[in-house]
Amino acid sequence: MLSKFKHNFKIFKKIDHFKNSLLKIKLNKFNSLIKKINFNKKNNQSKIKLNKPNFLFTKIKLTILTSYNRVPLLLAGAIFFALSYLSLPYFYNTNNLINKIEHMLSKNLNIKFSLSEDFSYSFFPRPSFVFQKVSFLNQVENLGKMKINISLSKLLFEKMKIKDVALYNVNFKINKDNYNFFTELLKKDFSNFKFEIKNSNIFYHNIENDVLFINKINNLKYYYDIKKLSNFLIADNEIFNIPYSIKFQNDFDKKKNTSLINSNLLKLKIENEFSYKNFEKKGLIKFLYNKKKSKAEYNFSKNLFKYSYYDKLLNSNFIYKGTINLKPFFLESSGYLKEINLNQLLNSNTFWIQILKTEILNNNNLNIDTSVNAKQTVSFKDLINLELKVKISEGLIDINETSLSWLDNIDFKISDSLLYIKDNNLILDAFISIKIHDYNELYKFFQTPRNYRKEIKKIDFNLNYNFDQFTAKLNDIKIDNLFNKKINKNLNQLILNDNMLQNRIYFKNLMKKVIKHYAG
């Protein structure tokens, strides 16, 4: 019994020992795992502790850069730098600045400007100088205002560059010494800047320095078109209160000038093409007047200028040819027209009458001898075979040897004539000679009773016609070399108007009285 108990006790002891050994192994593995976990945990925590300062520094740095306190400082610094740069011209020496700008203007435009010390500088909306007084062309009376824009990228004194130039309220005095001022500017280099003239006037003077006429410049601009390799001039002007526009182009590549002059008020458009490529210069001018087209071809070399003017090559309504010798100036021309409008010769509002009123043709050095032959006249169907001769010599204008016919019955001829200005009115003073081939046709036209049809062969009188007032005075009237006092009294003053029918009725009634007095 006891031995059995001991045997069982040993067995249980071995079992218990086995359990303890298993438990010890499990505890060792567990402790080893715990240590490994703790080591990894400590290692990770140390890494986190090492990276955390760098992350915080980066975050703080980003916060500082994007903070609301930093942005205004950056903007303020940029604005201060920009204003400081734009304000540099304020600190330039006045005399040196004026000399530099005058030098740049002379270099670019080949014009010697004189600028006053009364100027201002502004950098808004663009950096620019405004000089209150400026003169050039050796004329102290110009005294206009000049605005000069400066290149934004080149404000430093040594590198300063002109961008655009504009003149305001300038009076240009154009004479024989500087008559080509505006056309010569088309040859300058405008590739880097524009040149403008605004609200100014051009005074054209004769040799005696008298003002012939004034051209008002509303806006005029020179510029360069890089695509067309050309200089351009565009302008809006007024002359004799007539607005008109101009556009010129100087093509440097083709060596050709083109121009367009347009006046809507006059219903006139003039296009010109001029080639200066060869020694003999050639050109073509196209006219469009009140929907009527015409053109002129011309060429010149040295001092000789030739031209021909027509509406079409075949069956032309008019042909006009002439030759001009420039030194000394002499023009000789002649033309033929199928019909001519006498209203354009007698009405004071026409272009030619206005030109005569300017007295630009009353020049001692101007010599012109021209004639125009017209087969018919507009509005006066019975007046035919007009031969208008105009001569300008030593400042005097006459229409001597001008002749006209009334059907085949009466011939009119003008002599001892003179066109002149009096009280701003254009006056024609002339001696008129009338030859009557068939006096019966004259009486039929005026419906004269047969008992008043006295024979008439010749009528002479002095005519004084005012183009502006539409009045005519007939003096020293002689019929067949006989002076009649009553006739002179009735024809002493004729008052005409714009209505042609009323003029005809008026003239017929007047002539009936004259014929009655002549018949006695």
Image: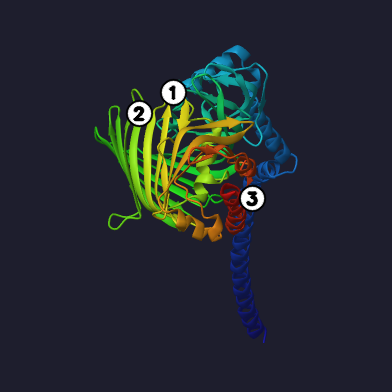
Question: Does 343 appear above or below 278?
Answer: below
* Kind of residue indicated by mark 1: Glu
Dot 1 alpha-carbon crowd within 10 angstroms: few under 14, some 14 to 19, many 20 or more: few
Query: Dividing the picture into quarters, in which one does residue 13 lie?
Result: bottom right
* Kind of residue indicated by mark 2: Phe
Q: Which mark is residue 394?
A: 1
Residue 302 in view (yes/no): yes
In this rendering, which labeled residue sits more in front, label 1 or label 2?
1
**Quadrant holding the N terminus:** bottom right
Q: Which residue is mark 3?
A: 48
Q: Secondary structure at mark 3?
A: helix
Asked if the residue under mark 2 is in contact with the one under mark 3, i.e. CB atoms within 8 Å, the reply is no
**Horizontal and vertical percent position of residue 333:** 33, 38
Q: Which mark is residue 342?
A: none
* Kind of residue indicated by mark 3: Ile
Q: Secondary structure at mark 1?
A: loop
